[in-house]
Amino acid sequence: MKTLLKFLPCAMLSVSSVSLSVADELSTDSANTMTCGTNFISVGDTEDAVLNTCGEPSFREGNRWTYSNVQGSFVYELTFGGGNVLSIHTRAGD
C-alpha cells in the first residue's frame, strides 16, 4: 500500500499535464484562424493571401493589421513576419 501511495502523486501529475496540454492546444487552435466571409485565414498564410481573401484591413500599424467583422462583434489582429501571418488574436468589438 505504501508503494502505491508513492506513485499516486506522479500519476495524478501526469493526468493533469495531459489535460492541461489538450486544453492549451484547443485554445491555441481557435486563435490560429479567422474567417473572412466563407473563407478562412490561418497562421502561415501570406500577406497577399490575406488581402485577396479579406481585402484591406480596417487599420494597419507596421506588421499588425486589424480587421473587424461585419457586425462589429469581433476584432481580429493579425501580426506578420517575413510576409506571413505569425499570430491571430481575437477580441470582442467595441
Image (cartoon, rainbow, N blue to C red):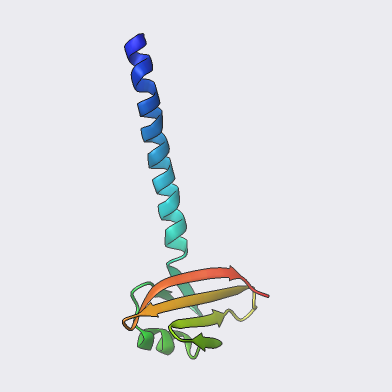
In front here: 31 or 80?
80
Residue 92 in the image: above or below residue 23: below
Could you tell me residue 71's position as x and y percent? 65, 78
Front-most of 32 and 59? 59
| Residue nearer the viewer, 36 or 64 | 64
For image coordinates 44% across by 54% down, the residue present is 26
Let me know if residue 31 appears in the view.
Answer: yes
Q: Nearer the viewer, residue 67 or 13?
A: 13
Q: Position of residue 18 (x, y in %)?
A: 38, 41
Residue plotted at (43% across, 75% down): 40
Residue 39 in view (yes/no): no
The quadrant of the picture occupied by the N terminus is top left
State the residue at coordinates (54%, 81%).
Answer: 67
Q: Residue 53 appears in which quarter of the rendering? A: bottom left
- Which quadrant holds the C terminus? bottom right
Residue 21 placed where, x, y %?
39, 47
| Residue that lies at the very extreme toward the top in this rendered image | 1
Q: Position of residue 55 (x, y in %)?
A: 48, 90
Q: How many marks?
A: 0
Name the residue: 58% across, 69% down. 91
Q: Residue furthest right?
A: 94
Compared across the picture, whether 82 is left or right of 50 comes to: left
